Structures are given as C-alpha cells and as structure tokens.
Image (tube, rainbow, N blue to C red):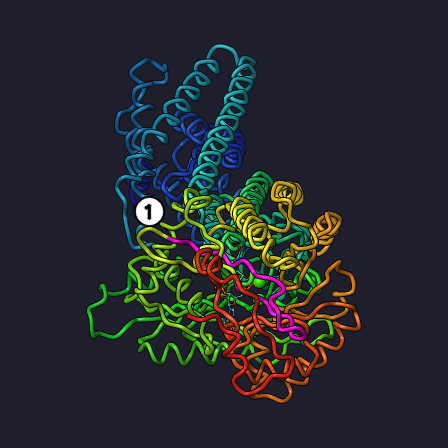
Amino acid sequence: MLALLAATLLVLVARPSLRGPADAAVIALLLTALFMAAESSQIHIEIGHQAWSVSLSELPFVLGLFLLPPWWLLLGRLVGAGVVFLLRRTAVATATFNLGLFAAEVAVAELLFQSLHPGAGLHPGDWLIAYLAMLLVAVLGAVAAPVAIALRQGRLTMSVFARVLPVVGLAGILNTTLALLSLLVLQVNRAALLLLAVLVAVVAVGYHAYQRLQRQHADLGRLFAFTQSVGAPETNDGVRSRLLAEAADLMQAEHAVFLPWADTDHQQLPVGAVVIPRGTRDPQLRAWLTRSGLRDALLVPLHDGGHTVGVLQVGNRIGAMSSFTQEDLRLLQTLTAHAEALRSNLRLLELRRHEAHHDSLTGLPNRALFLLRVDELLAAGPDHVPGSADRGAVMLFDIDRFREVNDTLGHQVGDLLLRQIGLRLQAAIPDDAIVARLGGDEFAVLLRRDVEAVTAMAMASDLASSLAEPLEVSGVLLDVAASVGVALIPEDGRGAAEVLQHADIAMYAAKRTTVKVARYDSDEDQSSVSRLALAGELRRAITTQLVAYFQPQMDLRTGTVVSFEALVRWEHPSRGLLLPDDFIPIAERVGLIGPLTSDVLGQALRACRAWLPEHPGVGVAVNLSARGLLDPTLTATVTHLLTETGVDPDLLTLEITETNVMADFAAALIALDDLRAVGLRLSVDDFGTGYSSLAYLTRLPVQEVKIDRSFVTAMKTSPDVAAIVRATISMCHTLRLTVVAEGVEDTNSLAVLTEMGCDTAQGYLLSRPLSPQSLAAWQRPLPYPLTPQPGWATRLRRPS
Ligand code: C2E
Ligand code: CA
Ligand code: CA
C-alpha cells in the first residue's frame, strides 16, 4: 500500500525519468552511501516493547530533495537501505515494510517540496519547507509503523504513538538542520563539508553514547526492580519463574526458558555463557539456531549448589532491527547471578525455618511446630460444646526411666534410642497424625480426626505398645516403656499450650497407673494447681510444719527394734497431713531439698538422742534425694548435727536410691565416700526398681540394702520373685551387706523372710510411721518370739 502510494504520488510530481543534471548520478551514489551509513548507524530506542529506530537518514534525504530529481532520490534511498537490510539479513516482512515506507516518505516529501517550489538560494523560507517536509515524513513514519505493528499484533496503543513522535521529531529537526547547513556550506566552500562531516560523526558518536547510557540506565532500573520484587521471601520455584519472566522482559526477547541440563543436548550447546546474534557467521551456532527455531539467542548456564543444573535460554530479540549483544549477555549474567544468590539465600532460609521447627536429633517436628499444628486444629472449628465430638487428640509420651539408659549406657546410646523411638512412633501413627519430639524423652502425637475419648485412649495404648517390642541400639536390645497422657481437642484446652500442659498432667497421672495411659482430668489439674501453691508455701513450712514420723525396723533374729526410719510429713494448716510424694518433688525442683533434708536430719537425730537412754543402740535412718546427696554442704551439716546431738555416727543410716546414685555416679561416689568418712552407715533404698546391678553395689561404700516393697508384695504370689528375693539376700550377705525388707504387711511374709535369712523387716505389720507423740508413748521393749507362730506378729503391734 505504501509503495502504491509512493508510486502514484511520484508520478503526479514528476514523470518517471532518471535523467537529471549531469552530476546527478554521482550525487545519487554519494547519497546512497550516506543512506547506507545512516541506516547502519541507526540507534534503537525501546518504547513499549518495540525498538524504534532513529537514524541520520534525514540528512541525505534533505540533501537529495535539494540536489536530486525525485526518482534519483527514491533510488538512492531504497538502494542504500536495501543493501543494509541484505547485509543484516533483516526479515523479509520488515524489510519490505521499511522499503515501502521509505518510498512513501520520499514521495510525500517530494510532493510538498515540488508544490512549494523552494528557490535555489536556500533562503530561510526554503529552510522552512525542508523542515515541513521532514516533519511530514516523521509523521508518516510515526503513523505507519504503529499501524503496521497493530496489523500484525492486533492492537494499537496510542500511548506508544505519543511517546515515539517527540523522539523521532527531535532527531528529524537535528538532521534537517545538519542537511541545510551542509547545503549552505556546499555553496560557499565544498572543502568545508569535511568540517561538517566531523560534526556529523561527533553527533553520531554522541547518539550512540547517549543510547548506551540510556539503555544501561533502564537496565539498571529493571535489575533493581527485579531484586526488589523478589527480595521478599518466596519459594525457590517462584524465584526461577520470576527470573524467566524478568529475563524475557529485560532482554526484550520473545521468550525465556529454562532448559534442565538432563533434557538438553548439551553436547551440542556452546559452553558457558554465549550470545548468538542474529545472522551469526559461526556455522555451528547457525545450525543450532535453526534446530531450535530461533533467530538469535542468549545462553547462560544456571547453577545450583555449585553444579550446573541447566541453561537459561533467552530467544528472539523483539524488534526487527536489533539483536542480542555482549552487553545484553553481561546484564543477563548479572540477573542470573542475582537470582542464584537469591535462591541459595532462600534455601538457607528454608533450612533455618526447618531447623527452627524440627528436632535435629530425630528430624521430627519440635515443640514449636507441634504447638503450631495444635493451634491450627483448635482454630479449625468452634469451641467445645459438651456432648459434641472432638476434632483431635494430643498424646504425650514420656519414656519411663530413660535417664537411666543415658546414665548407664551413655548419651550416645541414649540418642540412638531416642531416634529409634521416633522412627517407631512415626511408623505406628496413622496418616492423619503427626509425631513430634518435644524435648528430652518426651514425644507427642497429634491426631487430626474426629475422635471419642475411648478411641483416643485405645490408640494411645496401641502406640505405647508399639514401643514395647525391644529396640535394637548398637547391637543391644533395649526394653522401652512409655507413659501416655491424652488430652482432647478442643475439649481439654483453649490454646495449644494449655492442651499440651493438660496432656502433661495426664501423663504424670498415667505414670501412677498400671495401664500407663490416662486422659486429662480436671480434678487432677486441681491438685496440680495446688501443687504450685504448695511450692510457694514450702519455704515457710520448713522448720515449722514439717514433721518427721518414725517407722520401726525389726531385727528378724532378735525380734527387737533396731532402728527407725524417719519419714517426713507436712502438717499443713489447711490441707491436713501431706505425704512426701506430694512435696518432695517440689522441694527438689524449687531448690528447697537441702534445707528440708537438714530439717529432717535434725529432727531424726534429736529424736534418736531422746530414745537412746531407754533403747540404747537403736539408730535412725534418713532418706536422701538425688539433689540432697549431691548438696556440697551435706557432709558439714551431718557432722554438725551429729556433734550437736551427740549421737554416735554409727547409729545414723542415710538411705539413697540406686537411681539417685546412677544419675551422676562419679559425683555420688565422692559424696558417699565423704559421708562414710564421718562414720555413718549408708543404705541402698528401693533396691530392685532401677537398672539394678549387684556388680555396682560392690563399688559403693554401702552397708545395707533395702529390698523394694514391690518384691516383698509380689513374693507372696510369685515363686519366681521369691527366688529372686532369696538370691538377693544371699548375694548381699556375700558382699557383707545387711538386708532390710520393706513393706512387710503380713505374718506369712515375715516368716518367709526370716527363713530366707533376711536381717531386718519394716512395714505396716510392725507399725505404720509414728508421729513424735505416738513414738514417745511407745517406750517399752517389744517381745520377740524367735520362731514365728500363728498370731505372734499381732502381739508385736503396739496397743492401739
Ligand atoms: P521409702 O524410703 O521407700 O519409704 C517407705 C515408704 O513406704 C513410706 O512412704 C512408708 O510409709 C511406706 N510403707 C512403709 N511400710 C509399708 C507397708 O507395709 N506397706 C506399704 N504399702 N507401704 C509402706 P512415705 O512415708 O509416703 O514415703 C514415701 C517416700 O518419700 C519414701 O519412700 C522416701 O523415698 C521419700 N521420703 C520420705 N521422707 C523423706 C525425707 O525426709 N527426705 C527425702 N529425701 N525423701 C523422703
Ligand atoms: Ca527409705
Ligand atoms: Ca524404700
């Protein structure tokens, strides 16, 4: 259409003839060269995803208007541009459009020029005509190009049009001015054209420098925008897709894709980052372009953790006239490097996030994540309505006597065991549950389904029994048992912390049951609340409300009371008589066990001092807890109290449990040696309940062993247990240790123990722990038949 317009107009303006002034051919040749130079040194300005070319072409154009007949000018214009297009391998459609446009431009300019007849004198009026002609040409180009693009792309944006015009217009004015100056110079002194050429060259260089600067500026801006937009934490895939989008945008490319290394025929690919410009002369690269169906491309390798994982391929520069350059490649590399840095930052962040939410030993979710999940479940529905179903359950697992594994087999074995336990639980839970390690030997399972209390309890019990199968750790089979506390969601708590706390309370209750599984019970909670209150009151209670009760121990050969065990009670003004289990653990936790022990020791020794005149040789036993034993001031306190009361150290027995000793064997050994040096006796309490080993008994400076109540009770029904008790007594005797049987409640047991050779017995059969007042009333020596007869033991009891 443009060509048709050009031809029509030109025929109107001038008959088709190439005859002109004698030197027309020479001038045409020169102008053709100038057109070529202008076309090949054009600069591209990117506006709205399109590259707009601005060239010096108005310069030869205006010269031609003044110096050449129309057809000569047309020829020069078309040949000049055509040669450049050919050399550039410009796409046929683009070249055709441009040539048509150029022809139309020549025609329109000539029409104006011819109709206004400028004189040969180059007066200011003639200048105006030249400017007008070029303005017309600029408008034509600015209209035709967007229309052509719109025809191909189906949309026309006027804003682009508005932004293009000023740029093209400005260049036109500059070029026209230069042309007019050239013409004026030609009239005066042809040699001065050289000066103009220098000027033009400088302007051309200036153009390019400006373009480069502008381009870099814009690229920097987009690079900055990219870093800003993906600076916020995103997923790694997010970064990659952003990179692709940004790369295409920044490089003005039709597309950008990620070619995974595995899928790429990377044998064929050029190594490293390369730019393959349009019309590259390298035959291999050209073959690659053809195979890939691309005009031009940029290739940048993508790395991930030091390995090349693929190639970022940016293809087909938008805009017919330009192609990718080394500068584009550098920019793309910068962009890629930035994206890679972002990715590795994100990976670090993810790692950190994972670490913050997972336990490093087992890899399981940790307390923080578990609480989060519980809260999610709590938030997933309404508060609990009595009678309605629950949405889930928390089961808190505490491994029984885990500390002993750590202490006896070492922390490494302990760690391995915890890992195995984690795996066991993980394998045993259903799909809609998660397992977490809350810390230490505490694991928790969150069941996320509608569940009834009984079902949850049954599941908890099943999970606990999944742990019952021995676990192999470093070639050793270890038996594990767990106590489980169950709390329902949302019935048993308003927040995650509360649910977990309630499961914890249930877990402690479970420890006291035989089935080892318990559901949260708010009555239990009351006692736990009161326990907290007790902690506050305990400090004042020591020396005022704590009272040592005394339980007699009878020599089984003589039938006489040889000692009393001091058992502490708290005569609480409002709660009544509290037993040691209610407050000893609290005293340990709040650091009051030291004062408590001294208090009981003092009471015990003073009581002993008081009964000694009437019962010479009857000693007293005092219990020591784990922390009590390791109290560095203990030996000093004991020595002080012994001197103060004047009780023979030999009459004082300190009872320690195996677990207390095993908690820190080395330190306990030192403490025990110190105590032993004072001259008192040492006794192992609750023997048989820990990881009992007779072997370690030989290493402790003890004189007595107390067989745990549970054996004495079980002995009555189990011949096996009776055999164990008998063996223990005989082995202890081999080690020259005195044996005390605890918890003797019936005459039969007493008879059997006597027959087994047990030295001493203690239990309700003889007496319950006596308050100091009852003790004072109990003065006379006891009768002692040596051979137990039916009913004899009742006579042992003090008259009530
Ligand atoms: P223990 O050292 O094993 O004390 C024996 C416990 O068994 C006492 O419970 C006693 O009342 C109970 N008992 C005695 N004979 C029988 C019986 O025939 N049948 C049954 N079923 N039980 C019997 P108690 O007084 O409640 O003390 C519990 C634990 O508290 C003690 O266990 C001891 O470990 C600890 N304890 C008591 N007084 C003190 C103390 O002053 N300091 C420390 N650190 N711990 C103490
Ligand atoms: Ca004891
Ligand atoms: Ca005991």
Question: In the figure, is residue 620 to the left or right of 75?
Answer: right
Q: Is residue 563 magenta?
A: yes
Q: Nearer the viewer, residue 173 or 716?
A: 716
Q: What residue is rendered at 51% in x and 59% in y?
A: 567
Could you tell me how many numbered marks the image carries?
A: 1
Q: Is residue 1 magenta?
A: no
User: Which image quarter: residue 374?
Assistant: bottom left
| Magenta residue span | 551-571
Q: Which residue has dot 1 on it?
A: 2
Q: What residue is rendered at 40% in x and 19% in y?
A: 177
Residue 85: tell me if it is visible. no
Q: Nearer the viewer, residue 20 or 425?
A: 425
Residue 454: tell me if it is visible. yes
User: Which image quarter: residue 706?
Assistant: bottom right
Q: Which amino acid type corresponds to the residue marked 1 in the rendered image?
A: Leu
Q: What residue is rendered at 79% in x and 69% in y?
A: 735
Q: Position of residue 520 (x, y in %)?
A: 35, 68
